[in-house]
Image: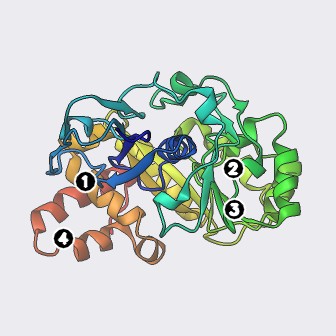
Amino acid sequence: MSPKFKKILLIDADSTIPNIPLMKLSTYHKKRGDRVKLVRLNLPYFPFRKKKTFRVLPKSDIIYCSVVFEGNKQHILGNNIIFGGTGVDLKTHLSPEIEKLPCDYSLYPENDTSYGFITRGCIRNCWFCKVPKKEGMIHQVAEIKDIVQHKKVKFLDNNILAFPNHTKILRELIRMHIKCEFNQGLDIRLVNKGNSILLSKLNYMGSYVFAFDNLKDKPILEEKISLLEWRREWGLKFFVYVHPKMSFSNIITRILWLKEHKCLTYLMRDISCWDSENKEFYTDLAAYCNQIHLYKKMKFTEFLEKRNWRNPERIKKHKKIWEETTNVKN
């Protein structure tokens, strides 16, 4: 007689954190008495990097594979694999029955943090972002109690401050005094005196993260940052989106403004930067901005000399770009 349970294989192609859909699928199948196994492939995000190709053998009854980053699906071969994730398409979702289930963190035994979404969607329509197409306008999908299973929690909401009841959520987190973080960033354009005070009272992990993606937002950033009176020097971090279509002046002006205001910068390169004629400059700039200890104490031109001391031509080329943009000789 054949066993009643099914063998379920979950493939985590490239997640950098515990994969929420796979953990919910695990809960669903374990409730049905199925045997669940997770395989992590750890495919890198970076494009144009050499990647292994994995062939999945048909030893399981059902095979699910979650792919976060575009281009990684082609490195997973096999029959009857159910693919999902942003790296595959924006339409495939878990069923409502599975979506409401808790995450099975036993798949990631080394993990000590809960992850989840209180809200999905966003009010913005940034041209480089997939969230509006994938999730629509902002709406609530869970309560805090549905997410927290550890002493620490990282919320993946894309724009929690845009949610009409966000102050209620912040007050609840303050009352719980749980270590928390909104690791996709907060929309500084939506900061006001009221929610600024609430943010300051959270038992927050790490730096508060915002974004400075559009140079036209500089006046409103200057206004809103003054409302964060409680901030420490270098206590705020800003994502800075970079695309080859943006001028060097646009990019460097944002970086210098943030450094002047003693804010950390995390350069987020569009995938097209790796195939750009200036890819090496973007690489050096990202290496500078994203290494906090160097960014805080060193000028970019000094960093270039230390990083590329064996490549004087690269130093000269990138110094020229920087100096022509800033009109400063260093």
Residue 160 falls in image quadrant: top right
Upstream in the sequence, badge 4 or badge 3? 3
Q: With respect to residue 214, does 266 lie above or below?
A: below
Are the residues at dot 2 and dot 1 in contact (C-beta closer than 8 Å)? no
First in residue order: circle 1 vs circle 3: 3
Q: Earlier in the sequence, mark 2 or mark 1?
A: 2
Q: Earlier in the sequence, mark 1 or mark 4?
A: 1
Q: Is residue 212 left or right of residue 36?
A: right
Q: Secondary structure at mark 4?
A: loop
Q: Does dot 2 land on a helix, a strand or a loop?
A: helix
Q: Residue 194, image x and y in percent?
A: 89, 50
* Residue 191 x %, y %: 77, 46
Judging by the rendered image, the residue that carries numbered circle 2 is: 222
- Classify mark 4: residues with Cα within 10 Å, few (<14), some (14-19) or many (20+): few
SS of the residue under disc 3: strand
Pick whichever, 57 or 294, lies toward us. Answer: 57
Where 312 falls versus 121 (above or below)?
below
Q: Secondary structure at mark 1?
A: helix
Residue 18 seen from this side: yes
Residue 281 is labelled as 1
Three-letter amino acid code at disc 4?
Asn
Q: Residues under labels 2 and 3: Cα distance? A: 26 Å
- What separation in Å lies between label 1 and label 3 (alpha carbons)? 35 Å
> Separation of disc 4 and disc 3 at Cα?
38 Å
- Residue 301 coordinates in the image, percent (x, y): 31, 68
Q: For the residue carrying disc 3, how many other residues have a C-alpha within 10 Å: few (<14), some (14-19), or many (20+)? A: many
Residue identifier under label 4: 308
